[in-house]
Image (cartoon, helix red, strand yellow):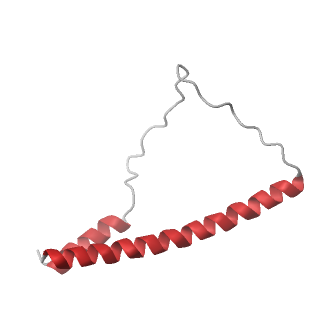
Amino acid sequence: MSADSDVKEALRLLCGGLPVNPVPPPRHRDETLPHAPTRTPVLNAHQQKVRGTLCVRMSLSAAAAGQKFMIRMMIMMMMMMRLMT
């Protein structure tokens, strides 16, 4: 197998994500272990709107950071594959 095909296969596996077929069954809480109490947030309408805005902002920045991370990982993998040949 050539280095290029190895890199392509590694990238294909990396970009494929987590296997979800079959999806594992849901796990239930073990009542014999101590757990934190269920949180019931008490927010007014304005606070809920601010919370939603912050969640969207954080999600977008996390997605951007994740893309940068994936690009860096792919570059590192390609460099490693070239060193091995």
Between 69 and 7, the one lying in front of the other is 69
- Quadrant containing the N terminus is bottom left
Q: Residue at x 83, y 43 (%)?
A: 42
In this picture, is 37 found above or below 64?
Answer: above
Q: Residue at x 69, y 33 (%)?
A: 38
Q: Position of residue 67 (x, y in %)?
A: 48, 73
Q: Is residue 79 left or right of residue 55?
A: left
Give the number of callouts: 0
Q: Position of residue 59 (x, y in %)?
A: 62, 64
- Quadrant containing the C terminus is bottom left
In this picture, is 14 found above or below 84?
Answer: above
Q: Quadrant of residue 81?
A: bottom left
Q: Is residue 85 left or right of residue 48?
A: left
Q: Quadrant of residue 74?
A: bottom left
Q: Position of residue 5 (x, y in %)?
A: 19, 77
Q: Position of residue 34 (x, y in %)?
A: 57, 24
In this picture, is 30 found above or below 8?
Answer: above
Q: Residue at x 63, y 31 (%)?
A: 36
Between 83 and 29, the one lying in front of the other is 83
